[in-house]
Amino acid sequence: MPPGARADFSCSGGAAVLTAVHGSAKVIDQRGGETEVPAGEAATFRDGVPAAPCAAADVLLATRWIDDLLVLKGRDDPELSARVSELLARIKSEAPTTRPAAPGPTEQLIRAQGDRWSEPMACYVQSPRSRNDRAQRLTAARLLSDLAPPSAIPDLIALLGDADGQVRFHAVSALHRLTGQTLGRSPEQCAQETAESLGQAQKKWQAWWEQNKARYAGTGK
C-alpha cells in the first residue's frame, strides 16, 4: 500500500473481504494475479480468488472495530485525530434538515458508547484545525456538553476562554451538568461574555476546581 494508506481485512462465511479505507490497496492472489482495490471499495476473496472490487457498503462502520484501539492512544495521536474528524464529518452529512429530529446513525453510535470519545473530542475543539469547519467544531462541543465525564472538567474550563460563544455555551452546560454549579454565569450569559469577564469566569472555575477536584474520583488532573 502507498504511504498513509489504510485497509481493513475481515473473514466471514468462508470469504475474506479487503476494504481500502484510505488510499488504494493491492493484493496478490494465490494464482499470482494482482488486484488493486481503490479507496472506498472492497474486494471479496473466496478460495483465494478475488471478485471484482465494488463500492464498500460503509467504510466507517466496517472499520469501527479499530476505534477500541485508537481511543487507547494519546489524545494528540494523528490517527485518532483523523478518526474524530471523519466521525464529525459523517455526523454533519447525516444531520436532518428539520428540527427537532433524532440524531443520525453515526451520532447515535457515539452516544451509545458514552464518554469514550470525550477526550479526543475536547482535544479536537481546542485544536487550531477545528476552526476550519465551525459546524463540526460545534458538533464536538455539543457532544461534550452531553457526554463529557468529570475527567473532562479541566478541558471544559479551558473552553470557557474560547472565542466562539456557542462553544462556551456548551462548555458551561457540561460544567453545570457535572457539578451542579454555574458560579454566577448561566450558559446563555457565558456565550455573550466580553473577553475581560471571560477571564474572570475561568479564574473562578479554576479556583473552584482546585478546591473540589479531590471529590471527583478518577479525574487525575
Image: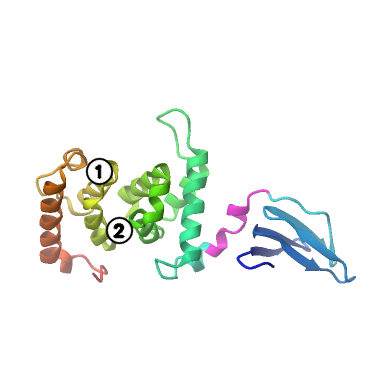
Residue 163 inside the magenta-drawn segment: no
Give the farthest residue toward the top: 98
Q: Amino acid at mark 1?
A: Phe
Instruction: Identify the image quadrant of residue 17.
Output: bottom right
Relative image position of residue 120 (x, y in whole percent)? 39, 60
Q: Is residue 9 above or below residue 60?
A: below
Q: Residue at x 52, y 39 (%)?
A: 94
Residue 149 - label: 2
- Where does the magenta region start and end? 57-66
Instruction: Identify the image quadrant of residue 118.
Output: bottom left
Tell me which numbered mark, 2 or 1, is placed earlier along the sequence: 2
Relative image position of residue 156 (x, y in whole percent)? 25, 55
Q: Nearer the viewer, mark 2 or mark 1?
A: 1
Q: Quadrant of the N terminus?
A: bottom right
Q: Amino acid at mark 2?
A: Pro
The residue that label 1 is drawn on is 169
Mark 1 crowdedness (10 Å alpha carbons): few <14, some 14-19, many ≥20: many
Is 143 displayed left or right of 78 in the figure? left
How far is disc 2 from disc 1 in space, using C-alphas? 17 Å
